Image: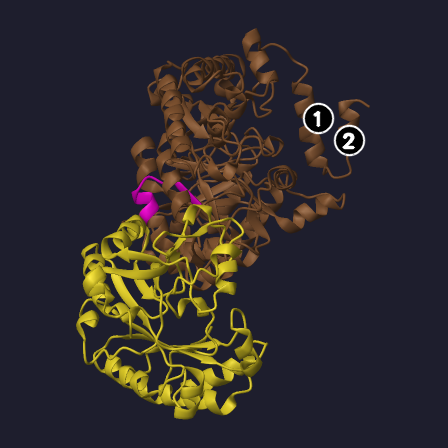
Amino acid sequence: MPWTGVYSIMKTAPVNRIIPFSNVDGPGNRCAVFFQGCPFNCLFCHNPETIHLCRHCGTCVSSCPTGALSLSPEGTVVWNKAACVQCDTCLKVCPHGASPRVRWMSVEEVMAEIRRCAPYINGVTTSGGECTLYNEFLIDLFTQVRGLGKTCLIDSNGSFDFEKDPRVLAVSEGVMLDVKATEPDWSRRLIGRDPDLVLKNLSYLLSVGKLYEVRTVLFPGRDKENEETVRTVSERILPDTRYKLIRYRPYGVREKYKQELGKTEAELSYAEHFVELAHSLGAKSAFVL
Amino acid sequence: MSEALKIIQDPTLTYKQELLALARLGESTDDTLRYSDAYYEAKKKGALCDLNEGVMPYRPRYICPDYELLFKKGCRFLELDPPKDLLEALNVLEIFYCHVPSITSFPVYLGDLDKLLEPFVIREDRAFAKKVIGLFLRNIDKVQTDSFVHADIGPEDTVTGRILLELTEEMQLAVPNLTLRYDPELTSDDFALACVRCMLKTAKPSFANHRMFVKEWGERYAIASCYNGLSIAGGGFTLPRLRLYECSLDAKDVDDFLNRELPRHIDLQLEYMDKRVKFIVEESTFFKTNFLVTEDFVKQENFTGMFGVVGLAECCNHLLGITDKKKGFGMNEEATRLGLKIMDVIRDRVAAHVAPYCDAYDHRYRLHAQVGIDSDGMDDSPGTRIPIGVEPTMLEQLEVNELFHPYFPTGTGDIFKFEETYLNTPEAILPIIKGSFERGLRYFSGYLENNDVVRVTGYLVKKSEIEKLRQGKQSVNNVTVFGKGAQDGGHALDRRVQHHEDSAR
């Protein structure tokens, strides 16, 4: 992990974007902070530009139609937010699955934006990329957010061992955990990793009462794999654990992986079948999105 | 072709709409009320607008009767006894409404329906109560055929309030407009969330900042017509408006506007209001003979004049030479600061003017951010709103609104259009309302983007009814035609949509 240690030196973390009001990142109205960088490389990733950090190769600079990108004398790509029209051309041409529109922000800078939203929100959700890459940053951030009387939720892919270092849990209300695949071969294919750590986190978070929600994406035509994942999760979680089943949608998925996963979304009726399965296994709070 | 002939040959007008149009035409033949030449000149230029109130006011513009009094002692003129049960209560109201005048000739305030009906409702079987209140709402929609007809509920949770919400959602009617008087301490979250859910599906109720209104008006205030704060047992005499963009056109610069052109136009509008108020009180018979007055359902001293403004955004942009609205008022600190300066001048000058009558308000008129009319097109945005089509994020829009809403005791508001996922997460909207009310927002309206019943600028119309007019057919609601005009000329239905993850990304 080349960037995990950065915070202790730089006291900043790469932020992809901050959304003042979101109704889909946890309960109530929440400010969602999306960090850049992810240790997984999921085939179905809808925002693959959040996976890697910018290598300052400069490919995007000349492609920008509004001149919002430039190369600094030090050779880094600089993004001019005011000139940007969010056309996403830079994301399309990036050869490294990164984004030049990432801001390296201090906790104080992120807090300044959160304070502005504070009167209107229930809390803050950190997401990504994978926000737990910046565990130290999160601990400082959450401590301050809680000082405002707001709640903190972590949206995570389960790549961080919460049991080994539970400090961030101590300052947050809980985790919204993605369990994408539980069968080892399918997991290695889909997310590039074994499922062990994710499942360990599932059990640990349950045991300490910090599992806010579990999410699983259902893929069209992958009956066996979907069933295996839903079954494994449903057998572990509690009747009142929120279990969100999300239908695969091809929007944003990289072209080469679309071939493999399909160009159509999973049908609602197909997803509802798995909700029934989850319910029958005791996961009474499973629902489809 | 004569104006009268045009009216009676217009295939889109119902009989009642023709009748009202002909009455207006008749009124316009009089010239008893005269104003200064400067007034007429400013009006011709479009800097002042009388909202087609008619040249000879024969009733106050808005009337908010004391329905509690009606239920307590009945009405001699209409031979109505105080109601003893729910059926009688609804019958008394239906009759009384038909005798409450207004600028539109329809009652703009139907009462605090939940409070009025609750003592009767709780004595009935709930299903029966719901059935007859449903019939009552149908009567209102088809008899009081005008979207400026407005009822209030709250702040407390009541059985009647719940029934009204259920029926509002089930019946999907444009009339009446509905407001929740909202106070987070008096209104339970559960009831407020039920209101949010209903608002998303039917564009009503809107949320009124109860604490703010109580501070200005006392407990007995009404929200009438679009979003107008007024006194119960009182109302609004008249509502003309400064069209601020046009007011700014002859100004040499910002200072010239603030020191000369703006005060000049304010004074002209005050002159107009004074004359009309005096005429209504002294010359017309309303305050002398109308049963609403003689039986104390309204009191003349509880009325005030409403000093309206529109087009603050365009005025600021023009004065600062901003041609790209996306970089103007609402998104630009300098323009927003100028807006506040302009509002300070208006507030102070109107507050310094001793108005005739208006006894309950220290003989002062009160400001109103007028919601726009169809003929405004894109020249003057409603009140102090950010122009449609260039709205920033919801957070930024609220922040700007919070600065301007406190100026307007007789009403202002903004409307937010939400994407479908919000239907499942009303609890994501309530904290926004709570937070913004805490910070000075006065009035919050919302609806889902794909509704049939939608809020145009302050009033409700059905998109399907607008479609009828487009096909040359009639719409029973008098206001549908305004909705069509606002959609065509002002793109009023194209406001920004709050998406599930809202960002400037």
Secondary element under disc 1, as helix, strand or loop, is helix
The quadrant holding residue B37 is top right
| Residue B190 colored in magenta in the image | no
Q: Earlier in the sequence, mark 1 or mark 2?
A: 2
The correct choice, above or below, for A261 with respect to B314 in the image is below
- Residue at 23% x, 58% y is A145
Would residue B373 be seen by someone viewing this image from the given angle?
yes
Task: Name the residue beneath numbered marker 1.
Answer: B22
Secondary element under disc 2, as helix, strand or loop, is helix
Color used for chain A? Answer: yellow
Percent across and percent down for residue B426 are 41, 59
- As drawn, the residue found furthest toward the right would be B1
Looking at numbered disc 2 in the image, what kind of residue is underneath it?
Ile
Would residue B302 be seen by someone viewing this image from the given angle?
no
Which stretch appears magenta?
B435-444
Percent across and percent down for residue A39 are 34, 76
| Residue B440 colored in magenta in the image | yes
Task: Name the residue beneath numbered marker 2.
Answer: B8
Q: Is residue B472 left or right of residue B192?
A: right
